[in-house]
Image (cartoon, grey):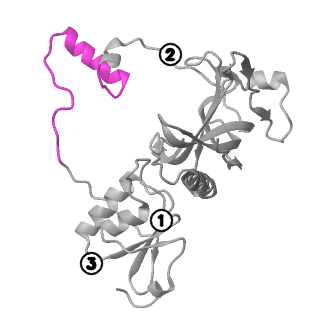
């Protein structure tokens, strides 16, 4: 059996969501799952992303060395650049089983993540009870135990467990009052308000269609490049490259071919999505006819434009 590398990574201060740190989540596993999703600002995520990607590449190389003729598939990864509530984040999903049953029938239990106050002191049992439920806006740092895994059914992946957690700012969880609108559960309405309107139309026997008409429109916007060199070259620096930004730059290039806009990516190897065939930032720029650089502005851009 191949022994994977174990790497401990501590996140920068980030937002928490779906945090189960004191009592484990038993909804889908009777033994319980301790978990927390970390939402890291893209500008602060470079080191964590590079460490995780590096660990994955070393694990894949280790497996390939041990089994050179075997083909491996990549499982879904517990990290990605994404958007939450319209804001860009680097999301890392951490989880750890609370226990289980060994092959010989004996049971095993896993200790919960060690919790610390913002000043670094270990939490007392009373303090843990106060942070049992974390609401939106809770921030902190997570020390993550990361290691590779591989199964025939799911492929090759990285497991990320929350070993220790510092809670910097705790926001009390307040569950939203449930409306009990069955209509919103049966259709793809974007909100319960839309579902309520649909229910009213149905109750009054008013025929309607929902989101079946496509209407084209244009919005006039102002774009300000990050850096404009004296030679006329416009340089756009990008950490996280959102879908909206990509659409914007394709539109600008089509409408303003006179502008020489170039990208300087913080990490040109970052992928647009978690899909296996997803383009990197650099590959996307090349595909759409943009010149680009990785990490810094090339000196040759200082001179005459292309």
Instruction: Decide which of tag 1 and tag 2 comes sooner along the chain.
Output: 2
Spatial CA distance of label 1 from label 2 is 44 Å
Give the mark toward the camera: 1 or 2: 1
Q: Nearer the viewer, residue 244 or 290?
A: 290
The quadrant in which residue 205 appears is: top left
The quadrant in which residue 247 appears is: bottom left
The residue that appears at 65% across and 18% down in the rendered structure is 31
**Disc 3 and disc 2 in contact, CB within 8 angstroms:** no
Rendered location of residue 140, percent (x, y): 70, 41
| Quarter occupied by the C terminus | bottom left
Task: Examine the structure image and report whether residue 98 is included in the region drawn in magenta.
Answer: no
Number of residues whose C-alpha sits closer than 10 Å to that of mark 1, classed few (under 14), some (14–19) or many (20 or more): many
At mark 3, the secondary structure is: loop
Instruction: Decide which of tag 1 and tag 3 comes sooner along the chain.
Output: 3
Q: Nearer the viewer, residue 235 or 276?
A: 276
88 lies left or right of 231? right
Give the mark toward the camera: 1 or 3: 1
Please name the residue that numbered disc 1 is placed on. 268
| Quarter occupied by the N terminus | top right
At mark 1, the secondary structure is: loop
Q: Nearer the viewer, residue 112 or 174?
A: 112
The magenta segment: 187-216
Judge whether 53 appears above or below 200 on screen: below
* Residue 223 visible somewhere in the drawing: no
Rendered location of residue 235, percent (x, y): 44, 74
Q: How would you classify the magenta stretch by its main secondary structure?
A: loop
Judge whether 170 appears above or below 53 on screen: above
**Which residue in the rendered view is the most extreme toward the bottom?**
304
Please name the residue that numbered disc 3 is placed on. 258
15 lies left or right of 228? right
């Amino acid at each position: 059996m191949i022994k994977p590398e174990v790497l401990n990574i501590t996140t920068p201060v980030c937002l928490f969501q779906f945090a189960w740190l004191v009592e484990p989540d038993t909804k889908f596993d009777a033994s319980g799952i301790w978990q927390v999703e970390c939402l890291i600002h893209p500008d602060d995520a470079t080191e964590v992303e590079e460490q995780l990607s590096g660990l994955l590449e070393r694990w894949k190389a280790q497996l390939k060395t041990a089994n050179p003729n075997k083909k491996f598939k990549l499982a879904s990864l517990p990290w990605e650049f994404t958007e939450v509530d319209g804001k860009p984040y680097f999301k890392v999903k951490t989880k750890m089983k609370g226990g289980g049953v060994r092959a010989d029938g004996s049971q095993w239990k896993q200790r919960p993540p060690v919790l610390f106050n913002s000043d670094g002191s270990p939490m007392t049992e009373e303090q843990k009870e106060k942070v049992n439920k974390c609401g939106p806006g809770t921030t902190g740092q997570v020390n993550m135990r990361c290691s590779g895994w591989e199964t025939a059914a799911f492929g090759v992946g990285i497991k990320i467990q929350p070993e220790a957690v510092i809670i910097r700012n705790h926001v009390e969880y307040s569950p939203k009052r449930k409306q009990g609108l069955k209509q919103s559960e049966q259709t793809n309405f974007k909100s319960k308000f839309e579902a309520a309107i649909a229910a009213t139309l149905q109750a009054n026997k008013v025929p309607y269609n929902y989101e079946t008409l496509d209407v084209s429109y244009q919005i006039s916007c102002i774009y300000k490049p990050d850096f404009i060199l004296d030679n006329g070259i416009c340089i756009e620096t990008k950490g996280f490259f959102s879908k909206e930004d990509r659409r914007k730059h394709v539109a600008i290039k089509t409408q303003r071919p006179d502008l020489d806009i170039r990208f300087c990516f913080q990490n040109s190897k970052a992928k647009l999505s978690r899909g296996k065939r997803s383009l990197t930032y650099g590959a996307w720029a090349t595909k759409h006819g943009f010149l680009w650089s990785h990490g810094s502005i090339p000196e040759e851009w200082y001179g005459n434009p292309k």
